[in-house]
Image: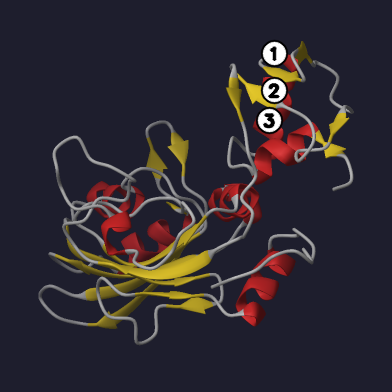
Amino acid sequence: MPEERLQKILARAGIASRRHAEQYIVDGRVTVNGKIVTELGTKADPERDHIKVDGKLIRLPKRMVYLAFNKPKGVVTTASDPQGRPTVLDFVKGIKERVFPVGRLDYASEGLLLLTNDGEFANRVMSASTHLPKTYLVKVNGRLTPEQEERFRAGVPLHGRRTAPAGLRLIKPAQNPWYEVTIIEGRHHQIREMFKHFGRLVEKIKRVKIGFLELGPLQPGQCRPLTAAEIGRFRRILKLGEAKDDKHP
């Protein structure tokens, strides 16, 4: 394998985004063949060189796996849970590679979640700078006024920082209406907090779309591999380029 910049190798291994990987290098946390490296232009061969972060050897996955999963309500978006609750990985069967969830869905939320072992792909999907939209169906305990809807779309101040502009569309008028919400960020409990800002509580939330990818007919607890066309489209959107060695189940 040809040599690559260290920050790219760390990102591919899922250690951190390229930007954060650069900081790891500058901070002296990365070694190559036992020597601390602090030069950002340093290259290495991940198959030949021993690359460690904080003393831990990193390895790149041999095969890239990309899955779409319909997370049920009452499942945690982690690899393990100290409280013994079911995790998203409990539903992944027949995949030998170790995959991890891309971002999070709240315990009480459901819907589309990506799973992968491609660290750089995951970092790009989660990065707010990518502006990859995520769309949700949200049931709340009362309608917003037209003025509140406009303020919601413009961005809401949360914890001292305004959210990015959001999409908001009433899709089912009722005493407890359903809204379609599209955001490009992923702050903790963001949609719940945005509605709470206007005195409304979220009763149900379901993610139905990530970028172009729709949840479709996937049932809760089911997952499927992304197609080669879907992977290629994501890589173009995320500006990752075409990786000749990428494979999928």
Q: Residues within 10 Å of mark 1 (few under 14, many from 20)?
A: few
Q: Is residue 19 shown left or right of residue 219?
A: right
- Which numbered disc covers residue 27? 1
Instruction: Say which amino acid is labelled 3.
Output: Ala
Q: Position of residue 177 (x, y in %)?
A: 19, 75
Seen from the viewer's position, the closer of residues 29 and 214 is 29
* Residue displayed at 68% across by 36% down: 10
> Do the residues bearing badges 2 and 1 touch, measured as CB atoms within 8 Å?
yes
- Which numbered disc covers residue 21? 3
> Do the residues bearing badges 1 and 3 touch, measured as CB atoms within 8 Å?
no
Q: Quadrant of residue 51?
A: top right
Q: Position of residue 114 (x, y in %)?
A: 46, 63
- Which numbered disc covers residue 148? none
Q: Quadrant of residue 43?
A: top right
Q: Position of residue 136 (x, y in %)?
A: 36, 69
The single residue placed furthest to the bottom in the displayed view is 217
Label 2 secondary element: helix
Label 1 secondary element: loop
Q: Is residue 74 shown left or right of residue 215?
A: left
> Do the residues bearing badges 3 and 2 touch, measured as CB atoms within 8 Å?
yes
* Residue displayed at 84% across by 33% down: 44
Instruction: Say which amino acid is labelled 2.
Output: Gln
State how far apart marks 1 and 3 are (Cα). 10 Å
State how far apart marks 2 and 1 are (Cα). 6 Å
Q: Quadrant of residue 212?
A: bottom right
Q: Which residue is mark 2?
A: 23
Give above or below for 59 relative to 192: above
